[in-house]
Amino acid sequence: MDSLLQHSEGMNEERKESAQGETSGKEVHKTDLRSLSFDELEAALVSMGEKPFRARQIFSWLHAKQAADFSEMTDLSKSLRERLSRRFFLTVPQLVEVLISNLDGTRKYLFGLADGNVIESVWMEYRHGNSVCISTQVGCRMGCRFCASTLGGLVRNLTPGEMLGQVYQMGRLMGKRISNVVLMGSGEPFDNYENVVRFIRLITDERGLGLSARGITLSTCGLPDGIRRLAKEGLPVTLALSLHAPDDEKRRELMPIANKYSLKEVLPACDFYFEQTGRRVSFEYSLVSGVNDRKEEARALAALLSGRNCHVNLIPVNPVKERKYVRSGARTIDDFKNVLEKYEINATIRREMGRDINGACGQLRQSYRETHH
Ligand code: SAH
């Protein structure tokens, strides 16, 4: 099981490209401009002989106006734009496919990356605002039994620029404001910790988009070190723990990561997160018929969480065709919720978004891989 958590090499944030206008095939290293922090951007500009104030202007182009190309940065001189494009590149996920739900307007996007990988992201409209769900890795190596994202294993980490690119592209394509970002697409955010935290710092930076950190939810399968580390970053994002079972034995049936970390390690890390940030933790519980949806399991869950200031999201499992799991019936789900409420545990049944369009994590990418390989 150790191999599960060995750190994969983060994607090199530099890209090799043939230098433009050169016939020798000489390669130059370009840096992903959108992944740079404000201070790094400023330092890079100063090293190019530019005045520091340019950093504000360019940061705004990158994150507030969400430019897709240097040519859009019209208040910069042509020569500066050219010099920038020689040193840097912008990550812009390319639209490959979009599926639009007839039920609720949810849109599922398949985006192509520069290296040919595809990732999926979701657009959801709620009464309180527009929410996007993004991927943090190409594939995933956590192995959850009911999840399609993990079927082909982990391919690579996404860069901060590629995570931002998903949000900015959906915003541009829809022409609408985004108020919430959930890191609940493919991938385990804590398996790509540095890039994910950098993404959160960039998207919440007031010199750019300035999204409220409170509008961001990070969902994890339960890596205690990651949870504790995030608690100390000073970022008030909402933490969601994928629990899916009231005890270790049942959890291990569904989630291999539970062999590595028991609930005795994971739940105290969540408590620590609450203590440090004051943010109420959400627990995700996907209901699988006959596996984790009995009343006794609801009672065990209530006992496990009792005394915690928390919230349980009940999600009818989305059947993935490679897996045999079946969703619980509406009645069973209601009963489960009622038991939790009887024990004073807050619970909501997650409204299913985009059930008609491969709603579950990783399904769209999986079907794309099947037809293109
Ligand atoms: N790796 C992170 C985030 C990605 S998964 C995590 O494990 O939390 C986002 C959520 O969707 C998790 O709660 C995950 O368990 C759940 N999920 C994945 N596939 C699902 C499916 N087929 N049906 C219901 N929920 C699913």
Image: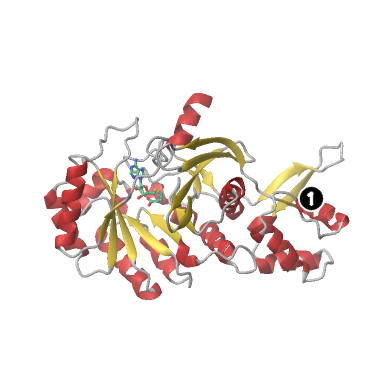
Horizontal and vertical percent for residue 252?
25, 47
Residue assigned mark 1: 71
Residue drawn at x 24%, y 62% is 346
Left or right, residue 334 beside residue 77 = left
Q: Name the spot of residue 183 as percent of width and height, x first.
A: 46, 54
Residue at (38% x, 55% y) in the render: 220
Query: Horizontally, is 267 left or right of 138 in the view?
Result: left
Residue in the foreground of this view, choosing between 281 and 98: 98
Evaluate whether residue 115 shows in this view: yes
Q: Position of residue 368 (x, y in %)?
A: 50, 30
Crowding around mark 1 (Cα neighbors within 10 Å: few <14, some 14 to 19, many 20+) is few
Measuring from the top left, give residue 238's x and y in whole percent. 41, 64
Pick whichever, 15 or 147, lies toward us.
Answer: 147
110 relative to 252 in the view: left or right:
right
Label 1 element class: helix
Labels in figure, total: 1
Amino acid type at mark 1: Ser
Where is 131 relative to 173, above or below? below
Q: Taking the image as drawn, is residue 373 in sight?
A: no
